[in-house]
Image (cartoon, rainbow, N blue to C red):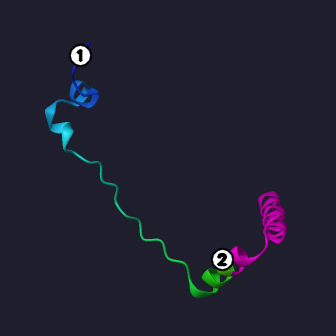
Amino acid sequence: MLLMDPATLQYGHAALGAKVRESQIAFRVNARDQHAIDAFIALPARKRKLVRDFIDTLSETEKKR
């Protein structure tokens, strides 16, 4: 049995304190879309499902064009 951290075995001693950093991607939603998202989230589950189904239907229609 080895008494070593698996990361140390794989990457060496430098990996112990190293952290992976991901670049932050700026994602902005305009005010009208944010309002629609907020209204969607406020809906009861049954109505959210109807909206998702409607969006799926619209998306399928666009894909066929």
- Magenta stretch in the rendered image: 39-65
Residue 11, position as x, y percentages in the image: 22, 30
* Residue 16 to residue 56: above or below: above
> To which quarter of the image does residue 25 belong?
bottom left
C-alpha span from label 2 to label 1: 52 Å
Q: Which residue is mark 2?
A: 37
Quadrant position of the C terminus in the picture: bottom right
Residue 12, position as x, y percentages in the image: 17, 29
Identified by mark 1, the residue type is Leu
Quadrant position of the N terminus in the picture: top left
Q: Is residue 20 left or right of residue 53?
A: left
* Residue 15 to residue 6: above or below: below
Residue 16, position as x, y percentages in the image: 20, 38
Q: In this view of the protein, which residue sits in the foreground, 26 or 63?
A: 26
- Whether residue 5 appears in magenta in the rendering, the answer is no
Q: Which residue is mark 1?
A: 2
Nearer to us: label 2 or label 1 = 1
Secondary-structure class at tag 1: loop
* Residue 6 to residue 25: above or below: above
- Whether residue 47 appears in magenta in the rendering, the answer is yes
Residue at position x 77%, y 63% in the image: 59
* Residue 8 to residue 55: above or below: above
